[in-house]
């Protein structure tokens, strides 16, 4: 038996962080200066003009299908938020930032599947988890900002113990006790960023996000009496079954982002990012199983019609082949309205990721397709809305639409249990973010 | 500031208790299993047995869909009062609860076909039922050849006077399964001398062998796990057009291998793309429960596939019909009441 491991990666890679960044196609490396810089580029935190706190919500609904039928991939929805706390040390601007995504369905999800079972590898499990980032940034010169910190992701490990009696002639007389011991932990990975202002109208940025992987170890022990009845002398033998599953529960490939932000017009900002994702290092999400089964035959042999189970033949693991990708992001922001204390913005963005997953014409079925992301959004800002808030108040909304064009997967083996299929679909992501700035 | 706190509170209040995880609905499948035997809550009586009678000695099921849902007719071989093998029919609206089953008191599956032709022996065997336009055609084996009977209601059949494929130098034909291909032609998989051969026809009434080389023979001796190394038999032909538009000729069959008490059988699967050529076997059995299961027939509906087999009774003294389902992960609803008619 071979089963596939569970969640890999990061909901922010897929759905962005905050409505402004999402609406601009996630092209934010050289532009983000609010809480979203905790993800897009921690160096941007040093550009904050004062303490800011943000809170928002988004919901991404998957409409992913195979053979024209929805696969029911869970939505990703939850709270996003964070804060930026700027200050000065020896006259040098610094800032501390926190970013947070808390899904409202589950904190983490573990799933082991046979390697042959179709699953939307990049959308099913991997985005169902908590994200927390803590960063520090510094601006040693007005034209340079540097930042870095750690991101934390939730991960799960567990053990299952079963013991009891199995009555092979009277199932209702069987008694099984089980004990589940699961723990929700965290894993950290680094991120670093730099931003260079080329003048008041242009800036460049470079961001590195580290990879992480977390082992998922599941163990199961089954110990019990096999009997033909509950009376004395009816016990046949004592069976022991042990399973040790070792796989990668969480894997995020390292990424490097090179981005630019430009103001060709006073009211128009254009951002462009290129993200290199080291998908080729992706760890095959398949567990190595070690199974031990010990069922000594009864002294008088097995009763007629009873055939003891045997250890299933170990299935060879078929590696998941993925390719590195450079993902272009482009975003624009137009200041549609600027009257004194009131401002309004219109935003749009686009990105494209060619699927990193290799052909699935063999026994594995890691579903994925090229992804076109189109986003729009808007926002308004009001400066000094009241005495209680001596800064500004910003409200942003976004609508992101991902298209995964439907295409065919053809199987080489006509006896393949899955067979040919079409796959594709789309994803809707809607959300809003409210930011309060204090000067 | 109060507004911010209010909004944050509202956002936090959106948190809910997670429902069961999704992502595994309507997954693609070629309908080829692996199958799991029906569970206790999915059948009346003792799972996975669907039809059980020591006197009738049920064997060789052949399923025919009666609609888009789970309404299915099942043809099978039973003993008649004289001890000869005849073909009878039953029906289940849920694919599992058959008219005339043991617990369906007062009902008996009606006999629809018995041996009465000059070329036939005293027994009929291995029905294979297929819908052709508005008719139901029932192929059967007798005396080493394959015959055909036609019906408009599925209960009253009229036989052709001669076999559609007679035994030849390869020996008697043990069983055959016929299906209509998308181009309207008829394809037959037949078991003969421990292997599976193929024959074709344009009208379904006269078949011509597609060569003398089997499309599926016994598996190689080094096969692991071994399940059909001693021979293959009882083909069930189930062609389909894949999502990519390719013709996939699927064949379920009985595989024989050495077992602890002599020969053991289980259900295998083989297939090919296109109308001609040898079949590629799946590397392991798609259904194996150590009950000498054999003679598969598969009924597919939107949510899954039901596999019908003949297998040993609980005391291994006669044969019963059992059921299995794929994908193995689905749970069937509680069984329907017994249908009022066959």
Image (cartoon, rainbow, N blue to C red):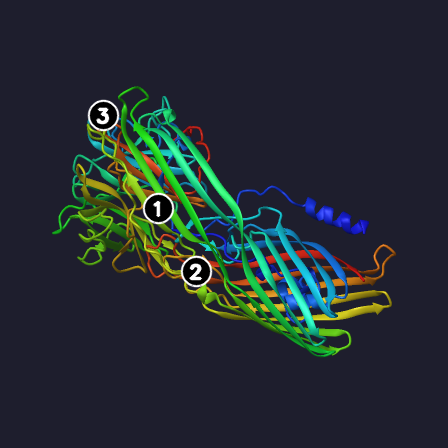
Q: Is residue B30 above or below residue B66?
A: below
Q: Tell me which corner region of the image, top left, top right, bottom left or bottom right, holds residue B85.
A: top left
Q: Chain of mark 1?
A: B
Q: Residue at x 80, y 62 (%)?
A: A381
Among the two numbered marks 3 and 1 on one chain, the one whose residue lies closer to the N terminus: 1
The residue lying toward the viewer, choosing from B305 and B326, is B326
Q: Position of residue A126 (x, y in %)?
A: 52, 55
Q: Residues within 10 Å of mark 2 (few under 14, many from 20)?
A: many
Q: Position of residue B172 (x, y in %)?
A: 15, 46
User: Dot 3 lies on which element?
Assistant: loop
**Left or right of residue A248: residue A326:** right
The residue lying toward the viewer, choosing from B305 and B124, is B305
Which disc number belongs to residue B81?
Answer: 3
Q: Position of residue B284 (x, y in %)?
A: 28, 49
The residue tagged 2 is A283
Q: Tell me which corner region of the image, top left, top right, bottom left or bottom right, holds residue A411.
A: bottom left
**Tag 3 near tag 2, CB within 8 Å:** no
């Amino acid at each position: 038996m071979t089963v596939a491991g569970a969640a890999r990666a990061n909901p922010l890679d897929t759905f962005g962080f905050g409505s402004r960044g999402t609406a601009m196609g996630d092209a934010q490396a050289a532009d983000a200066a609010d809480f979203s810089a905790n993800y897009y580029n921690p160096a941007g935190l040093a550009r904050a003009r004062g303490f800011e706190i943000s809170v928002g919500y988004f919901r991404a609904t998957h409409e992913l299908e195979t053979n024209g039928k929805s696969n029911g991939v869970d939505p990703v929805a939850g709270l996003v938020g964070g804060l930026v706390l700027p200050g000065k040390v020896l006259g040098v601007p610094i800032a501390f930032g926190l970013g947070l995504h808390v899904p409202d369905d589950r904190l983490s999800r573990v799933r082991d599947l046979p390697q042959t079972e179709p699953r939307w590898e990049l959308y099913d499990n991997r985005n169902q988890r908590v994200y927390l980032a803590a960063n520090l940034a510094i601006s040693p010169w007005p034209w340079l900002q540097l930042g870095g910190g750690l991101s934390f992701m939730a991960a799960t490990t567990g053990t299952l113990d079963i013991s009891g009696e199995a009555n092979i002639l009277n199932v209702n007389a069987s008694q099984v006790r089980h004990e589940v011991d699961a723990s929700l932990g965290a894993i950290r990975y680094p991120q670093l960023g730099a931003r260079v202002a080329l003048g008041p109208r242009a800036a460049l940025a470079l961001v590195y996000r580290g990879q992480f992987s977390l082992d998922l170890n599941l163990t199961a022990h089954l110990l019990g009496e096999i009997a033909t009845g509950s009376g004395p002398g009816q016990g046949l033998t004592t069976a022991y079954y042990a399973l040790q599953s070792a796989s990668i529960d969480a894997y995020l490939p390292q990424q490097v982002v090179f981005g630019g932000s430009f103001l060709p017009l006073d009211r128009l900002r254009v951002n462009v990012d290129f993200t290199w994702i080291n998908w080729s290092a992706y760890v095959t999400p398949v567990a190595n199983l070690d199974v031990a089964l010990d069922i000594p035959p009864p002294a008088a042999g097995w009763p007629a019609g009873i055939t003891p189970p045997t250890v299933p033949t170990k299935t060879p693991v078929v590696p998941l082949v993925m390719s590195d990708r450079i993902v272009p992001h482009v975003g624009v922001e137009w200041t549609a309205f600027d009257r004194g204390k009131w401002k309004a913005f219109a935003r749009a963005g686009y990105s494209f990721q060619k699927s990193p997953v290799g052909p699935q014409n063999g026994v594995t079925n890691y579903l994925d397709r090229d992804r076109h992301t189109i986003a729009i959004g808007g926002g308004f800002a009001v400066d000094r809305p009241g005495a209680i808030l001596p800064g500004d108040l910003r409200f942003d909304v976004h609508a992101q639409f991902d298209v995964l064009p439907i295409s065919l997967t053809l199987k080489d083996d006509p006896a393949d249990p899955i067979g040919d299929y079409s796959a594709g679909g789309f994803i809707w992501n809607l959300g809003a973010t409210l930011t309060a700035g204090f000067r | 500031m109060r507004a911010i706190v209010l909004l944050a509170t509202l956002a936090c209040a959106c948190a809910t208790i997670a429902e069961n995880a999704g992502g595994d609905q309507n997954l693609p499948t070629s309908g080829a299993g692996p199958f799991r035997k029906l569970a206790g809550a999915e059948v009346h009586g003792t799972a996975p047995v669907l039809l059980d009678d020591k006197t009738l000695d049920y064997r060789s099921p052949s399923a025919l869909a009666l609609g888009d849902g789970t309404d299915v007719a099942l043809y099978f071989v039973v003993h008649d009062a004289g001890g000869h093998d005849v073909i009878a029919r039953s029906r289940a609206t849920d694919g599992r609860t058959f008219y005339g089953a043991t617990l369906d008191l007062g009902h008996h599956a009606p006999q629809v076909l018995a041996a009465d032709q000059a070329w036939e022996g005293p027994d009929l065997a291995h029905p294979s039922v297929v819908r052709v336009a508005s008719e139901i055609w029932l192929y059967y084996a007798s005396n080493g050849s394959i015959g055909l009977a036609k019906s408009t209601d599925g209960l009253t059949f009229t036989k052709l006077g001669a076999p559609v494929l007679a035994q030849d130098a390869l020996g008697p034909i043990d069983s055959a399964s016929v299906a209509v291909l998308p181009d309207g032609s008829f394809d037959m998989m037949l078991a003969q001398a421990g292997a599976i051969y193929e024959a074709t026809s344009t009208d379904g009434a006269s078949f011509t062998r597609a060569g003398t080389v089997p499309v599926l023979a016994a598996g190689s001796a080094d096969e692991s796990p071994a399940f059909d190394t001693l021979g293959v038999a009882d083909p069930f032909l189930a062609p389909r057009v894949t999502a990519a538009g390719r013709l996939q000729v699927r064949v379920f069959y009985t595989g024989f291998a050495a077992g602890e008490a002599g020969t053991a059988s289980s259900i295998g699967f083989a297939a090919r793309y296109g109308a001609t050529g040898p079949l590629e076997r799946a590397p392991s059995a798609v259904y194996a429960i150590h009950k000498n299961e054999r003679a598969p027939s598969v009924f597919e509906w939107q949510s899954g596939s039901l596999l019908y087999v003949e297998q040993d009774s609980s005391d291994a003294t006669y044969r019963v019909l059992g059921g299995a389902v794929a994908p193995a992960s689905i749970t069937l609803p509680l069984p329907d009441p017994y249908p009022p008619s066959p």
